[in-house]
Image: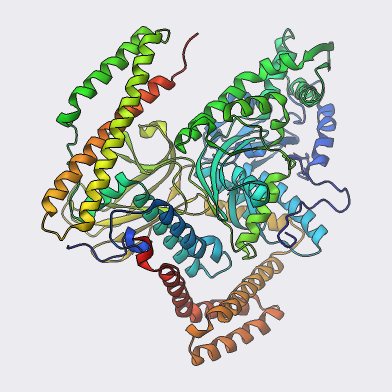
């Protein structure tokens, strides 16, 4: 696969370009490398060394944060493959359209009714649980896509890219939705 | 640090461990710090009685007593609250820096802060019997870039090299350390006199990793005092309320009453006024009613930090209390309620941050090899884009150091400069965020619109301070970036202040510069010796011989008094060892990367 040769996020952490990553091991690796190249270790060194350590540590941190979260890892993978989520990622994926509409309705209703409406609140809380489950499902779908990439010989690349894009875009929508619901449930209730 | 135990240094004469952050500047320009300054407060004010304008602050013309200068660090002249204008006189109220007007002189916050640092430096030198030149300074975690920069400036003005700024709650977690904190998630709640911070950390295998931080740099115990003052002065004439003398006496009475109420249920407040005496009884319940809104504000910040850390309320395994204001039973109770566990407070809340700073100094000096502190940037950083929108480049709670590179180009043909406006804050629009700096890229060679490719790297260092560099992607050349901070002092101003300080100081310029040169020599010689010990195999025999010769020359020169010779030899040695130094860095990174076999993680 034609990928840039410069030190990328995987290389910075000394990892092969595999999408399935064991998170506890990744964290351990990050801490271990951090202890070696963090600027704290070079506080008495000449300026050149200090600045090399500074940019090294910044690269390490950026790489760790990119790979730690499966969604940003997926987005980064698209980037490595010269792809990205469509700029006009405005259109709600068809699969989610109905849910998005219903949730927005419910939230608007809740805002209108004030905080006293217990039944409405319970309905939104139930909805929140459903959304959480749907998100878990999408994350599993992402993990399956990652595993397929790791096994792939390159022949199904186009299909994998399309699947990755569609999953990531649904996750992006689901995140916004969950955030909106949480915000509403969190907002202080008038007594 | 003594071994791996930190100890707070007390003044050898007075045995005081704390130095109150109070600075008095007398009419003749003499400066008093700490208890001396507090002692002067009533005297300065008595001289002024009769004139309405001042306590501890004769008339705004003679002298002043300044408390909690930290609150003014990094602020612009126009960012001082109305209430604070009642306490002090300011000059240049629209300028990029707060300037206190004291008599005929004008002082910035870093200059006043430098007086405190200087007093601490002297105390430490007296106690240790040796020079103190390099320091770790703690700052509120929620300090923005400008406030951090101002703190570094203060260090420089006090003749200190600021090796690192450490966030106060993080320092506290280091002080409790691995002996008293089990591995896991820890919340540090830090309510000081003027500022509030909450940090959530994950501690694992010697790594103290901050997950999220939040706070308010203008919320603290002082605000509770203020609420008490308002209560105390209820029903007094407006002219008296506006009087600085009355205000200061009332604040003193209020603060003492607040402290007493941490132990007793009820206390009497007595305030002498020009027209008579105010006597009021205050119960703890009443104090708590007054303090409640402020405590609630801190709890909201805690909830935000928990959310950013991705944790539920019961998700932390320990809660640590820091700062004098956490002595209030109300604070302890409410914090325990929020996090669902009893807070730890076995270390003195007034010492714990200093102890943690010492531990971090140990890390920086290489004596605490197994520990590592990974802190975060408290506020998002971005740039202004089309339509005045803030585009976020680095999100709040990103681990530092961190960097991001953005590409810029021109919009019209033959454009010679690209203007960039850097912002810090969480709001959507640039005008609602705090302006951090502006800079121009260029001059650019004439070319069609969109042709230039300039990569600008925004790097936030381990102190949480922004550094900007730019590179022309077509030519590979580094661009100079002349960053103009929106607030704060310029380098020239600091230089001038340093010169003034030297003029006034006990030491002459030459002598001071000689000391600086000798320090540089000492630093490079010891760094080189250490590197040759550890990485000697990376230097050839010829190089070694050359290094040794140059070192010996520098060693000899630094015994003498020829400052210029010392500086030249330092520069020479620095240049000569650069390739060797680069090899070490490469090897260190490579070694780190190769340590584990790749298969292990795949």
The structure residue drawn at horizontal position 49% and vertical position 69%, both measured from the top left corner, is A49
Observer able to see residue B183: yes
**Vertical placement of residue B163 versus A163, above or below:** below
The picture places residue B8, in percent across and down from the top left corner, at 76, 51
Q: Residue B291: x, y in percent?
A: 66, 20
Asked if residue B55 lies left or right of residue B99, the reply is right
From the viewer's perspective, is B370 left or right of B240? Answer: left
Viewport quadrant of the C terminus of chain B: bottom left
For the residue pair B178 and B403, the one nearer the viewer reads as B178
- Image coordinates for residue B339, horizontal then vertical, percent: 58, 30
Residue A166 position by quadrant = top left
**In the picture shown, does residue B487 fall above or below A93?**
below
Seen from the viewer's position, the closer of residues B7 and B498 is B7
Residue B376, how many percent across, how many down?
49, 46
Residue B279 is left or right of residue A61, and the answer is right
Residue at 49% in and 82% down? B576
From this view, report whether residue B338 is shown above or below residue B364: above
- Vertical placement of B57 versus B551: above or below? above
Q: Residue furthest right?
A: B13
Q: Nearer the viewer, residue A43 or B237?
A: A43
User: Which residue is depicted at the point 55% across and 60% down?
Assistant: A40
The N terminus of chain B appears in which quarter of the rendering? bottom right
Horizontal relation, residue A40 to residue B37: left or right? left
Name the residue located 78 percent from the left edge and 27 percent from the top edge.
B259
Report how many numbered discs are placed on residues in the image: 0
Say which of B377 and B553 sits in front: B377
Asked if residue B409 can be seen in this view, the reply is: no
Task: Tell me which colouring the rendered structure shows.
Answer: rainbow
């Amino acid at each position: 696969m034609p990928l840039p040769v410069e030190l990328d996020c995987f290389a910075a952490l000394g990892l092969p370009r595999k999408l399935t990553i064991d998170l506890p091991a990744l964290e351990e690796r990050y801490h271990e490398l951090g202890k070696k190249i963090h600027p704290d270790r070079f506080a008495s060194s000449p300026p050149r060394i200090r600045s090399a350590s500074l940019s090294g540590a910044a690269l390490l941190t950026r790489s760790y944060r990119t790979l730690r979260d499966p969604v940003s890892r997926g987005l980064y993978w698209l980037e490595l493959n010269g792809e990205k989520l469509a700029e006009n990622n405005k259109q709600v994926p068809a699969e989610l359209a109905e849910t998005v509409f219903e949730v927005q309705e419910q939230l608007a209703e809740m805002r209108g009714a004030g905080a006293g409406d217990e039944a409405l609140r319970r309905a939104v809380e139930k909805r929140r649980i459903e959304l959480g489950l749907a998100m878990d499902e999408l994350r599993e779908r992402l993990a399956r896509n990652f595993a397929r990439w790791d096994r792939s010989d390159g022949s199904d690349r186009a299909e994998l890219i399309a699947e990755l894009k569609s999953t990531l875009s649904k996750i992006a929508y689901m995140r916004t939705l969950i955030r909106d619901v949480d915000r509403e449930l969190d907002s202080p209730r008038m007594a | 640090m003594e071994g791996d135990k930190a100890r707070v240094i007390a003044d050898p004469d007075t045995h005081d461990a704390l130095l109150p952050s109070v600075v008095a500047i007398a009419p003749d320009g003499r400066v008093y710090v700490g208890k001396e300054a507090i002692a002067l407060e009533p005297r300065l004010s008595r001289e002024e009685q009769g004139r309405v304008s001042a306590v501890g602050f004769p008339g705004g013309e003679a002298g002043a007593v300044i408390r909690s200068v930290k609150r003014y660090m990094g602020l612009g002249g126009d960012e001082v609250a109305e209430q604070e204008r009642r306490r002090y006189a300011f000059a240049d109220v629209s300028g990029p820096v707060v300037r206190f007007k004291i008599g005929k002189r004008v002082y910035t916050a870093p200059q006043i802060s430098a007086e405190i640092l200087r007093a601490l430096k002297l105390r430490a030198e007296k106690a240790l019997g040796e020079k103190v030149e390099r320091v770790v300074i703690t700052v509120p975690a929620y300090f923005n870039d400008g406030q951090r920069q101002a703190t570094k400036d203060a260090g420089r003005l006090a003749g200190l090299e600021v090796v690192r700024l450490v966030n106060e709650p993080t320092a506290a977690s280091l002080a409790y350390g691995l002996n008293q904190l089990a591995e896991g998630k820890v919340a540090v709640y830090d309510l000081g006199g003027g500022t509030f911070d909450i940090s959530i950390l994950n501690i694992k295998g010697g790594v103290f990793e901050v997950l999220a931080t939040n706070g308010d740099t203008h919320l603290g115990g002082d605000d509770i005092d203020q609420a008490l003052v308002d209560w105390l002065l209820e029903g007094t004439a407006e002219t008296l309320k506006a009087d600085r003398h009355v205000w200061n006496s009332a604040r003193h009475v209020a603060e003492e009453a607040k402290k007493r109420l941490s132990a007793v249920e009820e206390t009497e407040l007595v305030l002498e006024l020009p027209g008579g005496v105010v006597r009021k009884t205050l119960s703890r319940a009443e104090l708590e009613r007054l303090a409640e809104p402020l405590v609630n504000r801190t709890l909201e910040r805690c909830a935000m930090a928990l959310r950013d850390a991705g944790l539920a309320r019961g998700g932390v395994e320990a809660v640590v209390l820091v700062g004098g204001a956490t002595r209030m039973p109300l604070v302890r109770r409410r914090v325990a309620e929020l996090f669902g566990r009893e807070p730890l407070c076995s270390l003195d809340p007034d010492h714990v941050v200093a102890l943690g700073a010492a531990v971090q100094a140990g890390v920086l000096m290489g004596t605490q090899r197994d520990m590592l502190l990974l802190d975060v940037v408290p506020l998002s950083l971005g740039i202004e884009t089309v339509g005045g929108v803030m585009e976020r480049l680095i999100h709040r709670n990103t681990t530092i150091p961190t960097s991001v590179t953005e590409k810029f180009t021109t919009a019209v043909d033959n454009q010679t400069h690209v203007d960039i406006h850097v912002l810090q804050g969480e709001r959507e629009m640039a005008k609602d965020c705090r302006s951090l700096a502006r800079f121009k890229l260029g001059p650019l060679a004439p070319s069609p619109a969109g042709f230039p490719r300039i990569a600008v790297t925004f790097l936030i260092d381990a102190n949480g301070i922004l550094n900007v560099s730019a590179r022309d992607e077509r030519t590979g050349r580094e661009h100079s970036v002349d960053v103009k901070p929106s607030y704060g002092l310029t380098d020239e101003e600091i230089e001038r202040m340093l010169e003034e300080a030297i003029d006034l100081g006990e030491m002459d310029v030459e002598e001071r510069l000689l000391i600086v040169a000798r320090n540089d020599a000492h630093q490079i010689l010891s760094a080189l010796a250490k590197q040759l010990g550890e990485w000697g195999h990376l230097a050839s025999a010829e190089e070694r011989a050359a290094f040794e010769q140059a070192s010996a020359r520098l060693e000899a020169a630094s015994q003498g008094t020829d400052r210029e010779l010392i500086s030249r030899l330092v520069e020479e040695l620095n240049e000569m060892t650069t390739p060797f130094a680069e090899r070490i860095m490469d090897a260190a990174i490579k070694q780190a990367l190769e340590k584990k076999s790749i298969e292990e993680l795949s």
